[in-house]
Image (tube, helix red, strand yellow):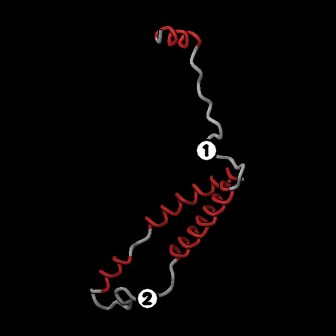
């Protein structure tokens, strides 16, 4: 389940970045409004929402849901973790221990 959620989260993250970069900013409308004959105000209401705006909202909502779901699943005790519970320490070889004992005499 977590692998599926993580995959969806990564795909949605990339899609959200692309969608946001494809949108034109409000500054583009502000420059056009000084030319005269514009029906919109500079920073006022933008009228009806565009398809890209609705798509951005939907993808951002899915991003938040996957973020919260991943937090919930990885926050459970006994859940998979990137960090190991017990770290095994390598033991020195026998001849290294003997050399160390000889050098202290």
Could you say which quadrant of the image residue 28 lies in?
bottom left
The residue identified by callout 2 is 45
User: Of the residues under marks 1 and 2, which one precedes in the sequence?
Assistant: 2
Between 100 and 74, the residue placed more toward the observer is 100
How far is mark 1 from mark 2, CA to CA? 47 Å
The residue identified by callout 1 is 82
The residue located at (51%, 73%) in the rendering is 52
Which residue is situated farthest in the front direction here?
Answer: 105
Could you say which quadrant of the image residue 75 lies in?
bottom right
Could you say which quadrant of the image residue 74 lies in?
bottom right
Between 79 and 22, the residue placed more toward the observer is 79
Q: Are marks 1 and 2 in contact (CB under 8 Å)?
A: no
Marks 1, 2: nearer the viewer: 1
Name the spot of residue 90 as percent of width and height, x first: 59, 24
Badge 1, how many Cα within 10 Å: few under 14, some, many 20+?
few
Q: Is residue 80 left or right of residue 9?
A: right
Name the spot of residue 21 as percent of width and height, x first: 43, 64
The residue located at (63%, 40%) in the rendering is 84
Between 92 and 82, the residue placed more toward the observer is 92
Q: How many marks?
A: 2
Name the spot of residue 64 as percent of width and height, x first: 59, 66
The residue located at (67%, 50%) in the rendering is 3
């Amino acid at each position: 389940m977590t692998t599926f959620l993580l995959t969806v989260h990564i795909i949605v993250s990339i899609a959200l970045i692309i969608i946001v970069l494809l949108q034109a900013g409000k500054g583009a409308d502000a420059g056009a409004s000084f030319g005269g004959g514009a029906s919109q105000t500079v920073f006022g209401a933008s009228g009806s929402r565009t398809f890209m705006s609705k798509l951005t909202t939907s993808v951002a909502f899915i991003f938040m849901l996957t973020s919260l779901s991943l937090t919930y699943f990885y926050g459970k005790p006994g859940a998979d973790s990137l960090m190991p519970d017990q770290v095994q320490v390598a033991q020195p070889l026998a001849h290294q221990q003997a050399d160390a004992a000889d050098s202290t005499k």
